[in-house]
Image (spheres, coloured by chain):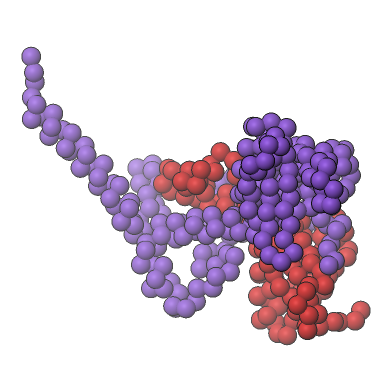
Chain colours: A purple, B red
Amino acid sequence: MKLNERSLAFYATCDSPADNSGFLYKRGERHTAYHRRWFVLKGNMLFYFEERESREPVGVIVLEGCNVELCDSAEGFAFAIRFSGNKSRTYVLAAESQAAMESWVKSLSRASFDYMRLVVRELEKQLEEMRWGPAGRCGGSREPPGSWKPKQCPERLPALPAILPKENGCAVWNNALGAGQAPNTSGCGGNDDEGTPRPPPLPPRRRVLNGEAAVESPSTFCQLHERYSREVARLRQDWLEKQRGPRP
Amino acid sequence: AVLKKRLVKLVVNFLFYFRTDEAEPIGALLLEHCRITKEEENIFSISFIEEPERKYCFECASEEQCQEWVEALKRASYEFLRRSLIFYRNEIQKMTGKDPLEQYGISEEARFQLGTHQQ
């Protein structure tokens, strides 16, 4: 199967920061000897190089649909990336210390696109519930029922606008979003069609009261409980203290 | 250039393409550091940052299908997902004062920190 290898190699070696990197021993496929390789994790791609200074990776492991597990073999600090399916392959790797092993297992098991998408969807859900309340999610107020499209980024939320620096029309790696900025959808970064940045969407009916931003939109039950429980707790505290009265 | 009919599948941040009667893909494009451009009618292209003049062109059956693909592909990269996560986290934190990533035990991860990765 053809891959845009040049793009892959670029992704592996460009100066966007890696999510993890370091030397690991990789067990060979046919011969079980371990080879020391320089590993670089970016997104859901685990690249490995012959040397740290190598200009191109010798291989890549796409971390989707796999399990990362510790090896119970005696080989020190070993762990495995296990894929299921007919042409299943298990990659056995070994770190040089307990700490390194734990760090790698943690980052590899959370590296998949699927995992990220799950977290993003959860956060989207939370944000929607805060803005519209749980009723809004049942297709009530905003859009006709059945319009929910389980795409990677449902259209019901306002489009995430762009105010990120561009380079060749692609967003450069930049997590310094500043106030209210968000990833955009033109190119993989950049601005709208006219090239002008769109301002971020304002949350609905947000007013500044007494110097504090107050959200007027319907609260979820959780927020109501939170708010009133604090008040009740305080009142109860006051009452208890009055009951005890001044003691000698 | 000759247009060939292909079955195209977007799976995570990869665009797979198949001959219409085959089960195994001919190839795949990793959709990172790429630019999706709406070209003329029914056509969009994908180009990559390290070779911007090379365009992979796709002709769709309709303008509607074309728009759908352009929108989907623009959001397909892992990097877009990461930026979305950071954006939502920030929004929720502003509104509630709490970090929504704490419940997942991932709030300390370097890859989610605002401003640590600058270019």
Q: Nearer the viewer, residue A192 or A118?
A: A118
Picture quadrant of residue B64:
bottom right
**Where, quadrant-wise, is the N terminus of chain A in this rendering?**
bottom right
- Residue A89 seen in this snapshot: yes
Q: Residue at the spot x=62%, y=47% of the render?
A: A69
Q: Residue at the spot x=22%, y=39% of the render?
A: A233
Picture quadrant of residue B52:
bottom right
Q: How many marks?
A: 0
Image position of A60 (left or right of A212)? right
At which x and y percent is residue A175? 64, 45
Q: Does residue B45 lie above or below A244 as drawn? A: below
At which x and y percent is residue B23? 75, 77
| Outermost residue toward the top in this view | A248
- Residue A105 seen in this snapshot: no
Q: Residue at the spot x=68%, y=50% of the render?
A: A81
**Where, quadrant-wise, is the C terminus of chain A in this rendering?**
top left
At which x and y percent is residue A84? 67, 61
Q: Residue at the spot x=49%, y=55% of the render?
A: A123
Q: Nearer the viewer, residue B10 or A141?
A: B10
| Outermost residue toward the right in this view | B1
